[in-house]
Amino acid sequence: MSSIKISNLRKTYGQFAAVDGFSLEIPAGSVFGLLGPNGAGKTTVFKCMLGLARTTSGLVLFDGKPLVPETFERIAYVPERSVLYEWMTVAEHVEMNRRAFKAFDPVRALELLAQFNVEPAKRSRALSKGMRTAVMVALAFARNAPILVLDEPTSGLDPINQRHVLSLIINEAARGNSVIFSSHQIGQVERAAEHIAVMDRGRLVLEGLVDDLKSDRKIVEGIFPNVTYSLNGIANDPRVLRADRTERIVRLLVRDDADNIATMLAGAGATGVRVLDLNLEDIFLFAVSPADATADVIAKGSS
Amino acid sequence: MPAVMTVDPRSGVPIYLQIVEQVKRSVALGILQVGEQLPTVKQLALDLTVNPNTVARAYRELEHDDVIETSPGRGSFVRDNGSTQSAKTAASDVARDALAIALREAKSVGLSRNDVRELIDTAIDRWFPEEQ
């Protein structure tokens, strides 16, 4: 069981801060999903964690200790882009990993490659994008590493092989190993991860247990009889995270106690008041879209 | 048992609650019988392709609700507390949740207390004709 702690990580390229004060604790034995729009800084966080990019400032600790060469024996990494040698065969990559890592299990690697229908005799340059991903995934999961860092581990894979990768992640979690992975496929994160962090523009904008975020956050929707109405200060309630309105319809993003807010909205004269569940995609989109992104959003405090 | 269990991860209902609800339903319907063993956390996680810690959380909730009991090294079993109490509890939990959803919907479309009472009376007459 291995825990990871990232404290106030910063990585700048010239004036641009790719990661801007990012802190996160990944408990031992958890599956952590890292979400974020393109360019949010997910890959940079992974590279800084693994010492593949020099951090501008901040600290990454594995079981309370900074990264040392021996730590690499305990971390398996699937990078976002292929790092396979074009002229080498898949079998030669298996052999190279066997020499590089003590705990690497070549039999398991070949088993996994067979499950992904990858022919070991093929050279890397003959592999499709999805097959390259499959090879890197097979090599990583044969490492017997207590920590797996997976940057888009299902990219380019067909739905059958995507599901296969999810099962591998779940299997690692059941063995007590820690997995941190990024994906744009929110449905996969929703299944495999119990914990998520959302990044936007280099910063952490949301973090929590997927099931808790779903339990806590609701949409309260109501319809007013005409366009002139007052919310009686409901939008200022600390439980209301944002308020959107289109003509007579008001939609409130509420944290905790949605039923109470629903009663207050009905009290303000709204009819058809409903409490709606949010899935992870909704929660993600709310986290990365600022409240002033659309014209029909009531800025908090103006009602 | 897991053959009848499915979860919808894209739903807004937390996955652990979906599992809790389905196990209770299976107990209420007799698909899972008193004393019957549930799959291990790992097995159910792999069957449903969901996080094992999420399944473990569902099992803890079911223990808390006295529906199942877990003995270390042996596994989790539908609780035998000398009666069919756990099945009855499970059945009323499932029914209460379904009723709450129906009532919330009725209220949201603007029905009054009396309208709802009328609907419920009609429904009871239809489903329990022998007890009229």
Image (cartoon, coloured by chain):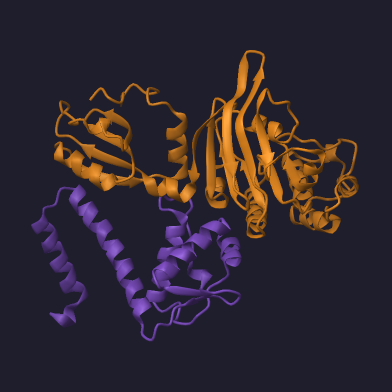
How many numbered marks are there? 0
Where is residue A292 shown, x and y percent of the image?
Answer: 37, 22
Quadrant of the image containing the C terminus of chain A: top left
Horizontal and vertical percent position of residue B51: 56, 55
Visible in this render: residue A271? no
Residue at the extreme bottom of the image, as rendered = B82
Q: Give above or below for A113 relative to A37.
A: below
For residue A300, side relative to residue B5 (left or right): left
Q: Single out the residue that lies furthest toward the top.
A: A15
Q: Is residue B90 above or below residue B36?
A: above
Q: Residue furthest left?
A: B114
On the picture, is B45 further left or further right than A253? right
Residue under the point 86% across and 51% down: A102
Point out residue B84 in the picture as x, y percentages from the top left corner. Answer: 36, 82
The x and y percentages for residue B126 are 18, 72
Would you place residue A5 above or below residue B39 in this image?
A: above
Q: Which quarter of the figure has residue A220? A: top left
Residue at (26%, 47%) from the top-left corner?
A259
The colour of chain A is: orange
User: Vertical placement of B96 versus A120: above or below?
Assistant: below
Camera sees residue A90: yes
Q: Residue at x 75, y 32 (%)?
A: A51
Frontmost residue, A237 versus A88? A237
Q: From the viewer's side, name the closer residue of A260 and A273.
A: A260
Residue plotted at (75% across, 45% down): A76
Q: Colour of chain B?
A: purple
Q: Nearer the viewer, residue B100 or B69?
A: B69
